[in-house]
Image (cartoon, helix red, strand yellow):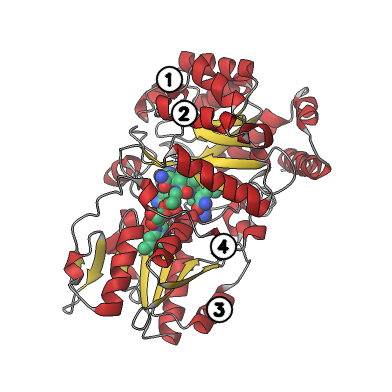
Amino acid sequence: MPGKINTVLINPPMSLEERYGQDLNKFGANSEPLGLAYLAANLEKHNYQVSIIDGLALGFNLSEVVQKVKETKPDLVGITMLTPMYQAVKGLSVSLKRILPESKIILGGAHATALPKDTLLDIGPVDYICQGEGENTMKELADFLSFGGDISKIDGLVYRNKNAQIIFNPARQFENDLDNLPAPARHLLPMEKYRLTASRVKKQGFCPTLIIARGCPFNCSFCSHPFGRTYRHHSVGRIISELKGLINNYQISQANFEADTLTVNKSFLISLCQSLIEEGIAEKLQWTCESRIDTVDVETLEIMKKAGCWQISYGIESGVQRLLDLINKGVTLEQIEKIVMLTKKTGITIRGFFMLGLPCETIKESWQTINFAKKLDPLWAQFTITIPYPGTPLFKQLKEQGQIRHFNWSYYNTWGGWADKDIPFVPQGREPSEIKKLQKQALISFYLRPGKLLRFLREVRSFAVFKKYLFGFFILIKNKWKKSSA
Ligand code: B12
């Protein structure tokens, strides 16, 4: 349609090695940027021309991305930004403005949402920031750039006016009915390039991610709420049809269901599971999801298992009740032990998320967490270093207390121990080097146990998965050796 602008959406180039460190590189996830795919689908629905350049998945460097963007001659460039992507986004914005001075640049995503003003002040070439959910804001901005209108009417937009003042339009209301948003435009993504971590796949072959719901009513201090506090889910019919599309187009037999917490709404979860069974999908497709200990029970676990769920990732965080209370987790150690036991009994494997270096955590307490993980013995355990991400209550609190060591966003990476990043926060009285070493020790101590190797061998379903496990054990042994020789 004449007059309508052309948009390109970008996942910034940033190597996996940079993100996870050389050793964990082969394990790190490289999953579909579904936020961009949702934005693109909505623009396509309104007859806008749009493309996506996933610089990360394609392994492009900055100049390769810039070259690709130049070829598409966009009127509008949208870039997604989580905190560790900051420098990559900044470099990209500066280069793009130099080469395409007429193109407008908009940023969105969790970091842009949390710190729009600082970002606009620091990255001069950026024209707009989208706070929160982006589909409707982006479509209204495309309309504005195509046909003119009143920019102050575009909710959720932050920008400079003619006098270079930063203007905050009213906040964008979250989309109540997620089904109003078309299914993500996966046809614009290099789907063959995506992979999940070894701990998330059951077998060889592609394992796509589906967004089931957005929003989370809980108050963990280390998490931001880019999608608000209300749990909003796609309808069961819509999820089933998206899944059938994926089965037909990509012949998948596994999937990853993503939501801030899948199991918040029990009746929805049960009807989703019933549909998966009735539609015959449960027989051919196995799936994983993330959940909270206090949102599942025997009934939900049993129906999830019947519906094809093979693994649940629980955010367990700590083995110390005092610390769980301090981060507002809202669960007890007893609840954790009970649900972990019930989940295992149902035959669903567990991936446990644990945090090291929480505020005022002592070394003894860090080891209590590691030992608690070993006692619970999920199949997989992930030990991440506590990072105060902008937009979280933890960031606000630690910043006010002057406890944040630096604001070099590139180092806001929960895998600091492996990527050897200078971590931005350590509990008082402790050293960054000690916490980073602890992250390695935690993994070594958890995985290099007699029995664990056998347990993994029982899980192996293909040679490709076996190779991934073997490689993982090799890295752990290498690091154990490094530690003893240091
Ligand atoms: C699933 C998930 C992951 C998955 C996959 C993420 C993916 N495919 O991109 C995995 C496990 C890989 C992951 C990894 C990480 N994650 Co994560 N993750 C999430 C989670 C739970 C859901 C994200 C999601 O898929 N949302 C659904 C899609 C539809 O939303 P979206 O991508 O945000 O996009 C929407 C809006 O943000 C906006 N938008 C986004 N980009 C743009 C761009 C433009 C131009 C516009 C207009 C709008 C816009 O519009 C989109 C549509 O509404 C969120 C929590 C949350 N609720 O957001 C944390 C979250 C995004 N993750 C977070 C973090 C920190 C990370 C890591 C950096 C952790 C680490 N290793 O150090 C890594 C880095 C990943 C990376 N890409 O570099 C933080 C980000 C905080 C911050 N300030 O940056 C969050 C918010 C959780 C938290 N702790 O608060 N994550």
Q: Quadrant of the C terminus?
A: top right
Question: Which of marks 2 and 3 precedes in the sequence?
Answer: 3
The label nearer to you, 1 versus 3, is 3
439 lies above or below 406: above
Q: Residue at x 42, y 85 (%)?
A: 100
- In the displayed structure, 108 sits above or below 312; it is below
Measure the C-alpha gap from mark 4 to mark 1.
46 Å
Q: Secondary structure at mark 1?
A: helix
- State the image coordinates of residue 236 (x, y, percent, origin top left): 46, 37
**Mark 1 Cα shell of 10 Å, populated few (<14), some (14-19), many (≥20):** some
Per the model, the C-alpha gap separating discs 3 and 2 is 44 Å
| Residue 15 located left or right of residue 296 | right
* Residue in front for this viewpoint, 245 or 256: 245
Give me the residue at 59% from left, 72% from top. 61
Earlier sequence position, callout 2 versus callout 4: 4
**What residue sits right under mark 2 in the picture?**
271
On the rendered image, what quadrant is the N terminus found in?
Answer: bottom left
The residue mark sitting in front, 4 or 1, is 4
Hey, what amino acid is under mark 4?
A: His
Residue 187: numbered disc:
4
Does residue 33 sit above or below 71 in this rendering?
above
Q: CA distance from mark 1 to mark 3?
A: 51 Å
Label 1 sits on residue: 321
